[in-house]
Image (spheres, rainbow, N blue to C red):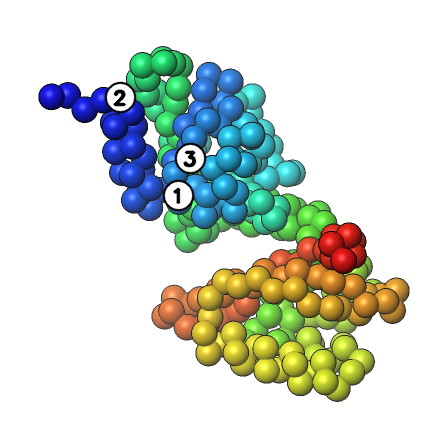
């Protein structure tokens, strides 16, 4: 007895969800109609949310775009996740047969680091990365495990009313006015260093206006070639109005 088409779809879905590659199924207009579990984790969307997007919607801003992402001669480009944070990806698309639609493509997407690229690509992608991160409205910064600031984008500096020069090389707790906030920051970084993994938390921050505001930070570890924690990357979003609305 042949398995039913519905049964085959379930089996195929289970197989796709086990892949390390992000998989998106798109139609002839490059509208996303399905995704696997890895794609949801990579982009931070649910499958339902991804299915409201086109492939071009995943492209990072300030990246030169061809007419169609599936026409890339060079399969390496820049995408961004739901929070707007950019990352470099390799894309491969191939047509697939479907009983209901013969114009579908399966797009496999792999998140790649700069170490996978040639030196020329390194330089190009560093420039793209810098342009995307610097122009992002997200509050993006990187820290050493002791909270020393190694990078802060323009939005981060503007939000807290400091220049890059005044931030870089200083510890984060050099800026908050309250002693208890300093102790909290020290303990927070120690806790992260003891268990370095991506996490999201909401906290109250004093903005340059002097008013306290709720910020949601997503912190991710950056490891060196030996697997040791090298830096902590932080991406912040102002959620103050959202919190007030909920209250």
In this orientation, which residue lies closer to the viewer: 236 or 16? 16
For the point 46% across and 16% down, which residue is it? 28
Q: Residue furthest right?
A: 209
- One can see residue 215 in this view: yes
Identify the element where label 2 is drawn: helix
For the point 23% across and 22% down, which residue is it? 4
Q: Residues within 10 Å of mark 3 (few under 14, many from 20)?
A: many
Is 95 situated left or right of 65 in this image?
Answer: left
Q: Quadrant of residue 165?
A: bottom right
Q: Name the residue carrying label 2.
A: 5
Q: Quadrant of residue 10?
A: top left
Q: From the image, which quarter does the C terminus lie in? A: bottom right
Identify the element where label 1 is drawn: helix
Is 146 situated above or below 155? below
In this orientation, which residue lies closer to the viewer: 36 or 171? 36
Q: Name the residue carrying label 3.
A: 35
In this orientation, which residue lies closer to the viewer: 31 or 166? 31
The residues bearing labels 1 and 2 have C-alpha atoms spaced at a distance of: 21 Å
- One can see residue 93 in this view: no
Q: Residues within 10 Å of mark 2 (few under 14, many from 20)?
A: few
Whichever of callouts 1 and 2 sits on the residue coming sooner in the sequence is: 2
Identify the element where label 3 is drawn: strand
The residues bearing labels 3 and 1 have C-alpha atoms spaced at a distance of: 7 Å
């Amino acid at each position: 007895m042949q398995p039913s088409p519905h049964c085959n779809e379930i089996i195929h879905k289970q197989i796709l969800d086990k892949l390390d590659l992000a998989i998106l199924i798109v139609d002839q207009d490059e509208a996303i109609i399905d995704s696997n579990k890895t794609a949801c984790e990579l982009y931070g969307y649910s499958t339902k949310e991804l299915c409201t997007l086109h492939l071009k919607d995943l492209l990072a801003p300030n990246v030169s775009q061809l007419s169609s992402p599936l026409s890339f001669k060079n399969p390496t480009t820049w995408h961004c996740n739901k929070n707007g944070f950019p990352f470099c990806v390799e894309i491969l698309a191939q047509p697939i047969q479907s009983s209901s639609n013969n114009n579908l493509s399966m797009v496999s997407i792999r998140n790649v680091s700069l170490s996978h690229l040639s030196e020329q690509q390194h330089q190009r992608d560093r420039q793209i990365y810098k342009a995307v991160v610097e122009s992002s409205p997200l509050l993006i910064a990187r820290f050493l495990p002791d909270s020393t600031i190694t990078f802060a984008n323009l939005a981060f500096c503007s939000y807290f009313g400091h220049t890059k020069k005044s931030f870089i090389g200083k510890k984060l707790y050099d800026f908050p006015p309250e002693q208890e906030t300093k102790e909290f920051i020290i303990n927070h970084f120690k806790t992260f260093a003891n268990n370095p993994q991506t996490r999201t938390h909401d906290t109250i921050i004093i903005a340059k206006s002097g008013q306290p505001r709720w910020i949601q930070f997503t912190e991710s570890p950056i490891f060196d070639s030996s697997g040791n924690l090298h830096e902590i990357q932080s991406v912040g979003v102002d959620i103050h109005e959202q919190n007030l609305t909920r209250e």
